Image (spheres, rainbow, N blue to C red):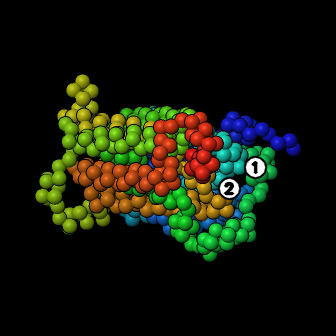
Amino acid sequence: MTAEKKSTFSKNSLFLYAAYISTCLEDRAWSFCISLCMQMLGGMRMVSIEQLFEGLLQIALSGHLGKLFDRLSRKTAILTVVPFNNLSIVGAAALLFACLSISDLNSWLFTVLLISAMCLCAINRLFLNAEKFIVGRDWVMVIGDNGLLSNMNATLTTLDQATNVIAPILTGALVTIFDLKTTVAIFGIGSLVSMASKTFFLRSLYMRNPELHFKETDDKAMILDEEDQDPPSRTRGVISTYYYQNTFPAAFGMTLLFMTVMGFDGLAVGYGSSAGLPDVILGAFRSYGSFAGILGAISYAFFEKQYSVATSGFIGLVVQQVFAVLAVVSIWMKGSPMDLSGYFGNFTIQLWWHDLVHSFDGANITTTQPHIDWHNFTSNGVSLDSIFMFLIAIASARYGLWCLDLAITHIMQVNIPENERNTVFGVHNAICNTFSVLKDLLVIILPLPSTFAICILISYAFVTSGHIFFIYYLVKSKTFSTIGRRLSKLNVETDADPEKTDVMERL
């Protein structure tokens, strides 16, 4: 077979993008649907509990699953994750459909079905993320090369965010036209269609690329490890494998960004819903956030080519920091639900425990529809200024987030050995979810909109800490001084001073 010339939009790349967009579409639409279901069945606390289920499973298994896939062939690995991913959606959809159909919400059957649905959602998230990492972190390195990596990463992120524009609007429209129960059933059936399409594209891609049939061997890695005098990869645990990477400060800084309620996940949807915003408006905000993420991905590719990875990441850091400050400001604006004195003045452990225990019996189910007065910009007489500022800020921050995310991802892909790639990204995902679980625990402890301001302030502290770790990596790797300088000038300086070659390789 004649080798196809590698480019960002070659036929091989298009097969990769087609499979990835199917994964992203099912991910974004299903996760938004789950958030709506949990908000309806138990409010923000139920959203947090469901996300806690997902996070705990990934913390426990993500790193070990990645290490297992590093030992398997790429074909075996992808044939494992795709069925687990899609069939778990089918099972969870069936259970949620049953929960939404039960009239007696205090029955033991409702509780069992709901907990079982959460478990399947957690399994789905574990294998869905594994599928994304295999295709978007490993296969992309084989299909492209270092010269194309930035463009291909940016394209994958753009596709991911494009589906995040489409999926919430589509989900909100389906819920409006039909109802939530029917929408859940539609997604269950759609998951089977998605599995068939991904199988076709991934099989075609695998057959067309003999490079995907081979991996760097452990024996070769052992020789390299012995030369570097580092612990051999076979004898390291998954955590130490992650820690020994020279990219650790940047990667760990990225994980800190997951300890935030200022991301557009189920908590933001629940917070907006508690303020009386309809599902379609929430979907539109989420889509706007995805559009901002697309612009961030496109900007990353441009700045990376004209300047450097360090410059692209630093621009993203500054933009995200600015909008994070605006999100913090929103808690003091007109219409803010913050009422710390009222909450803690009436707080008792007994009442908090009672509410937590009854989260699963449907006692907190939401059925009333708020009255939106767009002329006066109020919901049930309460100003929408605060919630709109918060949602606009966190959605706009996605521009900076994805510039920074792509920069760190590129740094990790280029520097991590091939035979450790799934292990490192698996541990990375587990640590990300550790902080995400801490966020969910925080909201479970402080579940009301009146205490959400505390969660926002703590989130800001973690986001800022993540930014500091990234800056530390730039200083440590001697790339901080390259920020804002064009690559053409840096290349000239490298030719004149060969000692700067190592720095340029990190760009």
Left or right for 149, reference 157? right
Is 321 above or below relative to 134? Answer: above
Between residue 229 and residue 299, name the one nearer to us. 229
**Amino acid type at mark 1:** Tyr
Q: Position of residue 227 (x, y in %)?
A: 67, 69
Horizontally, residue 451 falls left or right of residue 222, namely left
Q: Residue pushed farthest bottom?
A: 235
Residue placed most toward the observer, 107 or 76: 76
Closest to the observer: 64 or 314? 314
Residue 448 shows up from this direction: no
Residue type at numbered disc 2: Ile
In the rendered image, is residue 431 in sight? yes
| Position of residue 180 measured from the top left corner of the image (x, y, whole percent) | 44, 43
Mark with earlier residue (2, 1): 2
Provide the secondary structure element on which disc 2 rests: helix
Residue 485, given in percent of the width and then of the height, sits at 50, 37
Location of mark 2 (residue)? 78
**Which residue: 34% across, 61% down?**
441
Asked which secondary structure carries label 1, the reply is helix
Q: Which residue is mark 1?
A: 206
Image quadrant where one finds the N terminus: top right
